[in-house]
Amino acid sequence: MPRLRTHAAKESLLRQVRRQRLKYITVLPSLITILNGVCGFAAIALTSKGAAAGDSQFTYHRLQLPYFAIAGYMILLAMIADVLDGRIARMSKSTSSFGGQLDSLCDIISFGVAPAFLALNFLEHKVIAPAELNPLLESLLERFIWLAAAAYISCAAIRLARFNVENEEDESAHMSFMGLPAPAAAGVVVSLIIFHQEALPELSTKNTQAYLICEHAIIYTLPLLLVAIAVLMVSRIRYPHILNQYIRGKKPFAHLLRALLFLALIIWSRQAALVLIFCGFALSGAAKWFYHKIIRKKGTLVLPAERVTPMALDLGNTSFRDDNI
């Protein structure tokens, strides 16, 4: 009977919690979060127009860019909104479960669906449409591109759901990420497409051979890159929080020099800078993991069995853990 009463009390409490209505929200962070989702939706719409319009460009007053490039810039704008909403919410001490759920819903649009849809249409337009391939090869290539885009979306959703479960609202807990963040993964895809759409046409007028090499490298490695990025998102590889670890607070003088170097690179060529920043960030975590888990692990010394002393055997019977030594 006591167990039944306890269970009934729990069910009654859960029903009361579910009936509670959301009364108060933080307006400014929520508006910025919704701006994130709107930018992602705009990127999807511009990608659709780019796929239908072919090589024609998006024109607005003096702005004239390829549709795929302007869609990529909308995803970058969504990244800025994603940074600002969390920062403003923590500075105003107004973080909430509602804000976290709204942020993830907008993130899956801007950094999950939009980059995958952009990459899918870009590859179909550049690889499948103009090529005269064997029907069987064309079908296999198209299926692999769809599979890579689907894997990217699925892993982005898993990554965001896991972040919601493991996330802590304390600012001190936001020093690193477990797995490649979804905005950084989207940045890898977007930066390569922007570089292809804006920088490569200028290269084609100067060096045709270099243009062809760069174009084929981007187009034919992008499907494999989608799969690799998807795996990095759901992995347990730790990635640093750039703003909290390298910019915020007092840092060594070398951090200033690196920031100036990145600014100079952006001024020289923003397309090349985007590729180096996002691809370098994604590779850095994987390279560190490979070094610590594979190379450094092989170089560690193991104590030979004949050198184990009786004192060490007695210590082995104690109950303390190695991480407390």
Image (tube, rainbow, N blue to C red):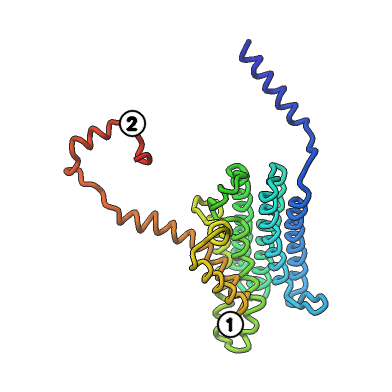
Q: Position of residue 67 (x, y in %)?
A: 74, 72
Task: Tell me, yes or no, if residue 177 can be seen here.
Answer: yes
User: Where does the image place residue 262, in percent across and percent down from the top left?
Assistant: 56, 72
Name the residue rendered at 66%, 14% in the picture. 5
Vertical placement of residue 100 versus 185, above or below? above
What residue sits right under mark 1 in the picture? 211
Front position in the image: 212 or 244: 244
Q: Quadrant of the C terminus?
A: top left
Label 2, label 1: how far apart the Cα atoms are: 64 Å
Disc number placed over residue 104 in the picture, else none: none
Q: Is residue 126 shown above or below 154? A: below
Question: Is the residue marked by circle 2 packed among few (<14), some (14-19), or many (20+) residues within 10 Å?
Answer: few
**Count of picture labels:** 2
| Residue 133 at x, y percent in the picture | 61, 73
Residue 228, can we see it? no
The residue at which mark 2 appears reads as 319
**Helix, strand or loop for disc 1:** helix
Tell me the mark number nearer the camera, choosing from 2 and 1.
2
For this view, does 210 lie left or right of residue 25?
left
Q: Position of residue 143 (x, y in %)?
A: 62, 61
Query: Is 325 or 209 nearer to us in this picture?
Result: 325
> The N terminus lies in which quarter of the figure?
top right
- Work out whether 6 lies above or below 270: above
